[in-house]
Amino acid sequence: MVKIKSRSDKYVELKEADYLLLVENTILIEALKIAGIESMPIYKAVRRIIDDKRVEVHIKPVSHRYS
């Protein structure tokens, strides 16, 4: 398990595989930014969806099958 300290001084537990996936995705996004994806319409659309908070992020799984 990996514990990440959040802004509210609480810890969020992640399985090692989930943490590694998070790190891998972060590296991938940074590489795409270097390659110039920020100027593409698909990136702008995704950024707008995230900024407008039209996507809900759940702390706990919606279905217990995934926990």
Image (cartoon, helix red, strand yellow):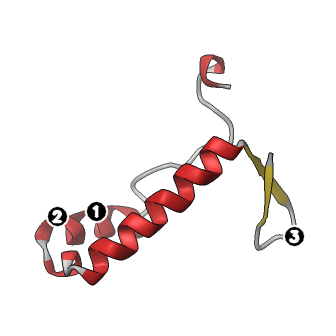
Quadrant (top left/top right/bottom left/bottom right) for the C terminus: top right
Q: Secondary structure at mark 1?
A: helix
- Crowding around mark 1 (Cα neighbors within 10 Å: few <14, some 14 to 19, many 20+) is few
Q: Secondary structure at mark 2?
A: helix
Against 54, is 14 above or below?
A: above
| Snapshot quadrant of residue 31 | bottom left
Estimate the spatial distance between the alpha carbons at disc 1 and disc 3, rounded to whole Å.
29 Å
Identify the residue at horizontal 55%, vertical 56% (top origin): 22
Identify the residue at horizontal 32%, vertical 61% (top origin): 49
Identify the residue at horizontal 64%, vertical 52% (top origin): 19
Q: Would residue 12 be found to the left or right of residue 43 on screen?
A: right
Q: Would residue 57 be found to the left or right of residue 9 on screen?
A: left
Q: Tag 1: residue type?
A: Val
Residue identifier under label 3: 9
Q: Tag 3: residue type?
A: Asp
Estimate the spatial distance between the alpha carbons at disc 1 and disc 2, rounded to whole Å.
6 Å
- Crowding around mark 3 (Cα neighbors within 10 Å: few <14, some 14 to 19, many 20+) is few
Q: Would residue 55 be found to the left or right of residue 9 on screen?
A: left
Q: Would residue 54 be found to the left or right of residue 36 on screen?
A: right
| Snapshot quadrant of residue 27 | bottom left
Q: Secondary structure at mark 3?
A: loop
Location of residue 33 in the rendering, given as x and y in whole percent from the top left corner = 30, 78
Residue identifier under label 2: 42
CB atoms of marks 1 and 2 within 8 Å: yes
Q: Tag 2: residue type?
A: Ile
Location of residue 13 in the rendering, given as x and y in whole percent from the top left corner = 79, 48
Nearer-the-camera pick, 38 or 63: 38
Residue identifier under label 1: 46
